[in-house]
Amino acid sequence: MSTRAPPRYAIARPNGILSVPATTTLGTSRTAIPRLKVVIRRLPPGLTQAEFEEALGEEWKVGGDRVDWAVYKIGKLSTDPVKPTRPARAYLHLTKQEYLGVLSEKVRETNFVVAKASVGDVVLLGPPIVEFAPYGRIPSNKVRKDARQGTIDQDPEFIDFLESLTNPTIKAAPSEPTNDSEVNKAEVMAVTPLIQYLRDKKANKGKEVVLQAKITKHARPESKESKNPQTPDKKTSPKSLKESTPPVDKRSASAIKVEKAARDAVRVLNKQAITAIKNPAVSSVAPTTTTTSLPSSAAPATPAAP
């Protein structure tokens, strides 16, 4: 019979620190992977790959004992001041870590001869330098093969497709519905929710119009007293309308002028007569006579002597 160990509890210390076993803090030790991929920067923009390999020497070519993978990125010479020149760079993967110092010393001592004479370009801030590549992995040489490659002739879906091309099946025409129930069912299936919503909205709108007409019809008519008195009644006879309309003076302008002059003369005579009645002495001493010329057509008629 196996005996189980009692559970282990952490005991709090007076200062608040808990005792933790050392095994929980120490993880599995991992061996550090050496960084063997480097990049050579600040190479002249006009330097080609052949000139770069010739300057470094045969021992730094791919396939030797020191380098097993390499990629060269050629630079770009720009004559446009807006677009700066891009220097060249080379990526190398070394086989051993002790070759890092040797390669750095070799690049520092090497004088790269460029046919395009771009060694002293402004974009080169200093001599070539060796750095670790940002991404340390290199592409694998393994070629992945698809297990289903070349087996399309055995695919059942592809076989059915080929058969449908060689022997096309003719679909039978849909039979016409014989019963009314089938017709209604087909119509219901053809109606979409949007069409049904529009139909319901139209039906409700018609009901609202009918209800509004009934409310207007049964509403209490306005009293006659509330009507505008200035608005003539529809039953008023044309004769009463004609009498209520003020007469229009159809005389000429000359006749109106003569009548006005006669009225002014009569007013002046009346005023003189009133003055003579109030002051008879003045009227007897210095009688005044005011004559107003009237047109012949407007002269007042003299009454005949008795």
Image: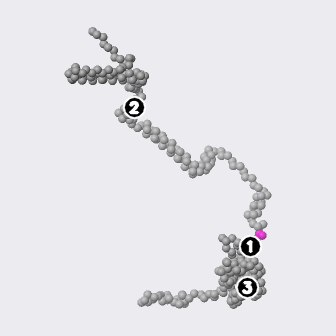
Q: Which mark is residue 181?
A: none
Q: Amino acid at mark 2?
A: Thr
Q: Which mark is residue 231?
A: 2
Q: Is residue 294 above or below residue 165?
A: above
Q: Amino acid at mark 3?
A: Asn
Q: Is residue 88 visible?
A: no
Q: Residue 64 location in percent, x, y?
A: 77, 86
Question: Residue at left 55%, top 46%?
Answer: 199
State how far apart marks 2 and 1 are (Cα). 99 Å
Q: Residue 241 location in percent, x, y?
A: 40, 25
The residue where tag 3 is placed is 111
The span shown in magenta is 146-151
Q: Quadrant of residue 85?
A: bottom right
The residue where tag 1 is placed is 146
The reply to whether callout 3 and callout 2 are in contact (CB within 8 Å) is no
The reply to whether callout 2 and callout 1 are in contact (CB within 8 Å) is no
Question: Residue at left 67%, top 78%?
Answer: 122
**Label 1 Cα crowd, 10 Å radius (few <14 / some 14-19 / many 20+):** few
Question: Which image quarter holds the N terminus?
Answer: bottom right
First along the sequence among labels 3 and 1? 3
Looking at this view, name the residue that lies furthest to the left.
281
State how far apart marks 3 and 2 are (Cα). 115 Å
Q: Residue 255 location in percent, x, y?
A: 40, 21
**Label 2 Cα crowd, 10 Å radius (few <14 / some 14-19 / many 20+):** few
Q: Residue 242 location in percent, x, y?
A: 40, 24
Indicate whether residue 150 is drawn in magenta: yes
* Secondary structure of residue under mark 2: loop
In this rendering, which labeled residue sits more in front, label 2 or label 1? Answer: 2
Q: Quadrant of residue 231?
A: top left
* Secondary structure of residue under mark 1: loop
